[in-house]
Amino acid sequence: MRLLVAMMKHETNTFSPVVTDLDRFMAWGGYLGEEAYKAYKGTGMPFGAYLDIAEAAGHEVVTPVAAEAMPSGPVKAEAYEFLTGKILDAVREGVDACLLDLHGAMVAETTDDGEGTLLENIRKIAPGIPIAVTYDLHTNLTQKMVDNCTCLIGYKTYPHIDMVEVGSQIAHVLMRTIAGEVTPVMAWGQPALLAQTLRMGHDDEPMKTLLALAREAEEDPKVLAATVFGGFPLADFQDAGSSIVVVTDNDQALADKWRDRLVKEMWQRREEFVYQHEPLVDAVARAKEFDTLKTEGGPTLLLDHADNTGSGGTQDVMTVIEEVLNQGLEDVAVAAVYDPDAVKQMQKAGIGAKVTLKLGGKTDMPSIDLKGRPLEVTGTVKTLTDGRWTVRGPMYTGVQVSMGHSAVLDTGKVEIVVTSNHHEPWDVGVFTSVGIQPQHKRYLLLKSRIHYRAGFGDLGKATITLDGDGVTTSDNSILDFKKVRRPIYPLDRVNEP
């Protein structure tokens, strides 16, 4: 058999001003044809799992595209047409089944439902073709996405350290389907809940209990897959929000039963999906009292979550860094500030040079009425690199990533990693690749929400969440939702049981 294996990933923040064009995909993780195969073979990705399982079964594999961009604004029409076109052309040329590694929260200029539209178009070309899909835990599931595939699954971890496992699980379901051993049927439900990303960690409640229930469901051999989707709350479109999907072997009643149980549990615990804020000045002052490096042998982690490029942030908001500098925290490493111009200035000055930069603050954010505001910082150029390194941690294992040309600015108290590409710090490579040993720092200031736990969870001895500014804010009061279905909690105080 000839199997299509493809990846197209983007988590779209419709409030983000960061442009998502084809160059953004290709610069961070875009490969075509044989290069896609080479880039992801043997990696800790669903794409890599698909290749292993298909080849172990003796099937021919075609890999038209593997592309991912860091989260940002709506995908440009040209980029969406190019990427989906590669997949659709391969289907037209003739394949027997599709194994797709998608995100599930892509909004494009031409469609609010990027994945659903792709699947629908595949079905138009090949109506009966078996299709299996692996989605992110932050998928905003739609009817179109469910109706136009054979089976689907989502990650059960955040940070996403189980990508290989879930990709393998749904690939095996598809193989058994092709062999006539199982007949997948699905049930999905969508509570009126726009859960907040900071409340979706798999080790935290309420997701911990919900994910345990999903695993309990999968203990039944007739349940092929059960997924709790937290959803992505910063994609303002009709179906944004949390959902449940259960896949069984030709047992709709069983799928419905587990779907209903999980939806009920999620809805009853809706208040736990809302993040509670703390004034930034108070949180930084608390951090200043910590000295976990001495008492527990590791750094305190400081999370600048409102400017997390892994959720579509501009990664150049300086609010939190400024407060850390103002309060005099020492022995801090920051990952990372996106500022290509600052990198160029440091390259021109050279290693060892003392420079004064207007750092960050280059991007306006009209959706939240926030103007970019650079911060004047003086320091020494400590490191210059090309920004390329390979992930060795448990998330994206084996994948080569690029921060673009990068530099380290050392103010004496704070070392700031400055990059030319957006990159969320979910692996220690953001520091080690530029010569910083994070385990020996008193503080690590990370522009991240939960993914940081993949690389830094065991390293950090305490974590403080800092409420700064940016388009990945958890403050719904400053976000103007226009398209999402209403009423929905917590935008509306929905009181139904």
Image (cartoon, rainbow, N blue to C red):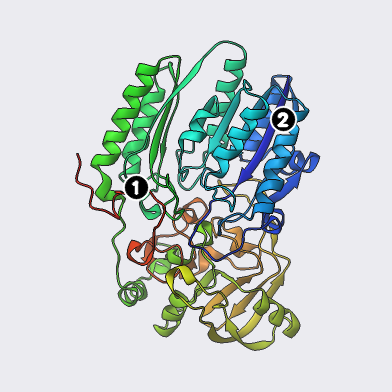
Q: Residue furthest right?
A: 34
Q: Nearer the viewer, residue 63 or 435?
A: 63
Give the residue type that dot 2 points to: Val
* Residue drawn at 52 percent across, 48 percent down: 112
Task: Check disc 1 and report the residue beneath it.
Answer: 204
Badge 1 marks a residue whose secondary structure is loop
Place of residue 155 in the rendered image (x, y in percent of width and height, measured from the top left): 49, 38
Left or right, residue 215 beside residue 55: left
Judge whether 176 appears above or below 196 on screen: above
Q: Nearer the viewer, residue 183 or 400?
A: 183
Task: Check disc 2 and report the residue beneath it.
Answer: 91
* Residue drawn at 44 percent across, 77 percent down: 319
Of the 4 image quadrants, the one containing the C terminus is top left
Judge whether 254 appears above or below 408 on screen: above
Q: Considering only order in the chain, which callout, 2 or 1, is on the residue closer to the N terminus? A: 2
Q: Are marks 1 and 2 in contact (CB under 8 Å)?
A: no
Q: Nearer the viewer, mark 1 or mark 2?
A: 2
